[in-house]
Image (tube, rainbow, N blue to C red):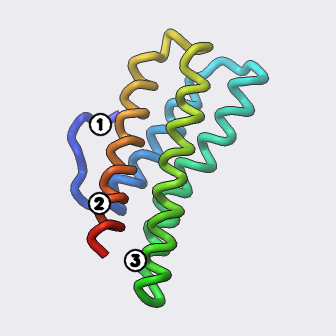
Amino acid sequence: MSKNKTYNLEERTFEFARDCRFFVKELSKTISNIEDAKQLIRSSGSVGANYIEANEKLGNKDFVYRLKISRKEAKESRYWLRLLKPLNENHSSNIDDLIEEADELRKILSAIINKV
């Protein structure tokens, strides 16, 4: 996972989804890891997908709506990461980094929503 922050939000959301996938690849294949990882894969990918949709807005209401979905997916990604953490203590540092990125993405998206 890259420590340098990308300022292009479309690229940064892509990197978050990619890093979540790399993380999931390293997890042991327990039932809870598999199920929680599936949810993480979906929500982390949706952050960027909905941000891209927002940029193809049909108007301000559509723009804000898509950004709110993207923000919601960042929050959800954080939730799945928190669930994975107690059972994967050997990946604690990586999980903390991903949680931090999910939080930062949520804050950035909130700031954009508040300015519109």
**Numbered label attached to residue 2:** 1
Q: Are marks 3 and 2 in contact (CB under 8 Å)?
A: no
In percent of width and height, residue 36 lies at 68, 32
The 10 Å Cα crowd at callout 2, few under 14, some 14 to 19, many 20 or more, is few
Q: Quadrant of residue 76?
A: top right
**Numbered label attached to residue 112:** none
Q: Give 90 or 65, whichever is nearer the viewer.
A: 65
The disc, 1 or 2, on the residue closer to the chain's N-terminal end is 1
- Structural distance between the alpha carbons of marks 3 and 2: 15 Å
The 10 Å Cα crowd at callout 3, few under 14, some 14 to 19, many 20 or more, is some
Q: Secondary structure at mark 1?
A: loop
In percent of width and height, residue 66 lies at 50, 71
Q: Quadrant of the C terminus?
A: bottom left
Q: Are marks 1 and 2 in contact (CB under 8 Å)?
A: no
Q: In this figure, which residue is indicated by the disc labeled 3? A: 55
Q: Which residue lies at the image location 48% right of the left edge and 48% below the top edge?
A: 74
Give, as a three-letter code, the residue at label 2: Ala
Q: Which residue lies at the image location 44% right of the left edge and 74% below the top edge?
A: 64
Q: Give 5 or 61, whichever is nearer the viewer.
A: 61
The disc, 1 or 3, on the residue closer to the chain's N-terminal end is 1
Outermost residue toward the top in this view: 90
Q: Which residue lies at the image location 71% right of the left edge and 21% below the top edge?
A: 29
**Numbered label attached to residue 111:** 2
Task: Determine whether 4 is above or below 115 in the image.
Answer: above
Give, as a three-letter code, the residue at label 3: Asn
State which mark lies toward you, 3 or 2.
2
Outermost residue toward the bottom in this view: 58
